[in-house]
């Protein structure tokens, strides 16, 4: 959901090796498709959130500490939200 709300399109049809866009992402290629629309901080957050192996995937707290997501929280705090 976070990815779609950021770039307005889904990154792949399904997370499977036979999906070309997913296979490209799994190889570490973020130069094509919707990934090129993300700023570097958002792309790093997505890389950590979308790790295929659950044991290596960042949890919510770790993602909230990413500089890109933390900046939005600081902005909201400054506005009193």
Image (spheres, rainbow, N blue to C red):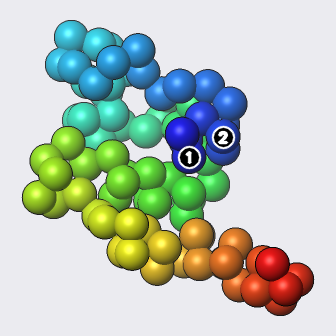
The dot on residue 14 is: none
In the image: residue 5, left or right of residue 26: right
Q: Which residue is mark 1?
A: 2
Q: Where is residue 20 drawn, in percent x and y?
A: 32, 14
Label 1 with label 2: CB-CB less than 8 Å: yes
Q: Residue furthest front?
A: 81
Q: Which residue is mark 2?
A: 5
Q: Where is residue 59 drawn, in percent x and y?
A: 31, 66
Image quadrant where residue 60 sits: bottom left
Q: Residue furthest right?
A: 79
50 in relation to 19, above or below: below
In the image: residue 58, left or right of residue 43: left
68 in relation to 7, above or below: below
Residue 5 visible to an observer of this rendering: yes
In the image: residue 33, left or right of residue 52: right
Secondary structure beneath label 1 = helix
Residue shown at 60% from the left, 35% from the top: 4
Number of numbered tags placed on the structure image: 2
CA distance separating discs 1 and 2? 5 Å
72 in relation to 51, above or below: below
Residue shown at 48% from the left, 73% from the top: 64
Residue shown at 16% from the left, 51% from the top: 54
Image quadrant where residue 12 sits: top left
């Amino acid at each position: 959901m976070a990815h779609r709300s950021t770039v307005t399109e889904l990154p792949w049809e399904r997370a499977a090796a036979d999906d070309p866009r997913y296979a490209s992402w799994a190889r570490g290629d973020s130069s094509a498709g919707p990934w090129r629309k993300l700023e570097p901080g958002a792309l790093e957050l997505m890389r950590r959130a979308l790790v295929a192996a659950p044991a290596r995937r960042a949890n919510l707290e770790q993602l909230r500490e990413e500089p890109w997501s933390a900046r939005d929280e600081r902005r909201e705090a400054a506005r009193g939200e």
